Image (tube, helix red, strand yellow):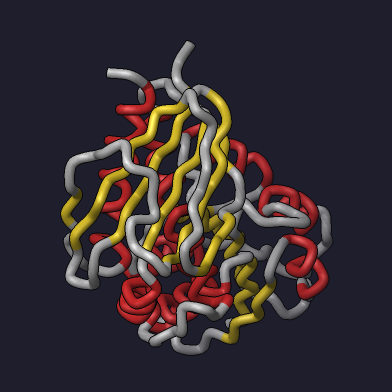
Amino acid sequence: MGIDTKAADAITQATISFFKTMLTMDVTPGKATETIGPASQPSISATIGISGDLSGTMSLHVHPDVAGNIMESWIGERLAPETAECRDGIGEIVNIVLGDAKTTMSSGNINFTFSIPHVIFGSEYQINYPADVSIQNIGFDSPLGTFEVELVAAKES
Amino acid sequence: MNVLIVDDSAVIRKILIRHLQQAGFDDVSPIEAVDGADGLSKFDPDKIDLILADWNMPNMNGLEFVKKVRQIPTPNYIPIVMVTSEGTVDRVEEAFEAGVDSYIAKPFTVDHVRTKISALLDDDF
């Protein structure tokens, strides 16, 4: 199993753990695909850069309505998706998930650092990546709606 | 209890305040800061009873903030809890060496907050 696959597994488990721990909610992952998100438009995408043994980006793509549902369940307030606080919250989810996955992977001696999240909000945008990367996009079902978690990793040399 | 909460995420600051109240710390008076530099500017050694600080923040990160706070003379020892997504062993050790007293890894629950902070406040610093 390559580092990118191990990372995708760790990120999947960390996503499940985040929703279970902080929203007391079960989310169900689908099979990873090589599709570049976001699948739905409009969307909110939060992305974090990764550097080290694992190199690339991790993103969360979520429809604005689902983002509102997630924030309402998490902090008890309905936030409009265009607000800074809603985008901050979606970015923080990526930060927490990747941090948790990093802790898991460090026990397997795979180490990396990551940036502060950047959040994009709008319609009909597409994120372009370099050609020679591994893409794993994992769709999740939840009581709040669907969302995607995406790992784009540089291929191991 | 005056709690300085240093985190660049407004959502996390809000959740921490709510968790502190739900954990039974009813007398919490939160002072919010958006990064380490803002935290230092709002740090009053005579008034702050507890600090909760994130690690990864712009301008001044949580580790730098903790090191600077520990250089400031205070009339009473002020416990610092690092609340962060950075949970690897080397990061935790680095935080304790910098002067952190306890560590809460994100994601966290009300029980995590209650357990860690109660243990700190029960200690005789």
Q: Is residue B125 left or right of residue A154?
A: right
> Residue B123's spot in the image, x, y percent?
50, 61
Q: Residue at x 66, y 48 (%)?
A: B99
On screen, residue B64 above or below A89: above
> Residue A61's spot in the image, x, y percent?
39, 58
Seen from the viewer's position, the closer of residues B94 and A138 is A138
Q: Quadrant of residue A79?
A: bottom left
Point out the residue furthest to the front here. A124
Residue B71 seen: yes
Seen from the viewer's position, the closer of residues A86 and B6 is A86
> Residue A102's spot in the image, x, y percent?
43, 37
On screen, residue B96 above or below A113: below
Residue B23 seen: no
Q: Which quadrant would the N terminus of chain A be assigned to in this image?
A: top left
Labels in figure, total: 0
On screen, residue A140 above or below A62: above
On screen, residue B123 above or below B11: above
Q: Quadrant of residue B114?
A: bottom left
Q: Residue at x 51, y 69 (%)?
A: A122
> Residue B124's spot in the image, x, y percent?
55, 62
Q: Residue at x 71, y 68 (%)?
A: B76
Q: Is residue B125 left or right of residue B63?
A: left
Q: Residue at x 51, y 48 (%)?
A: A127
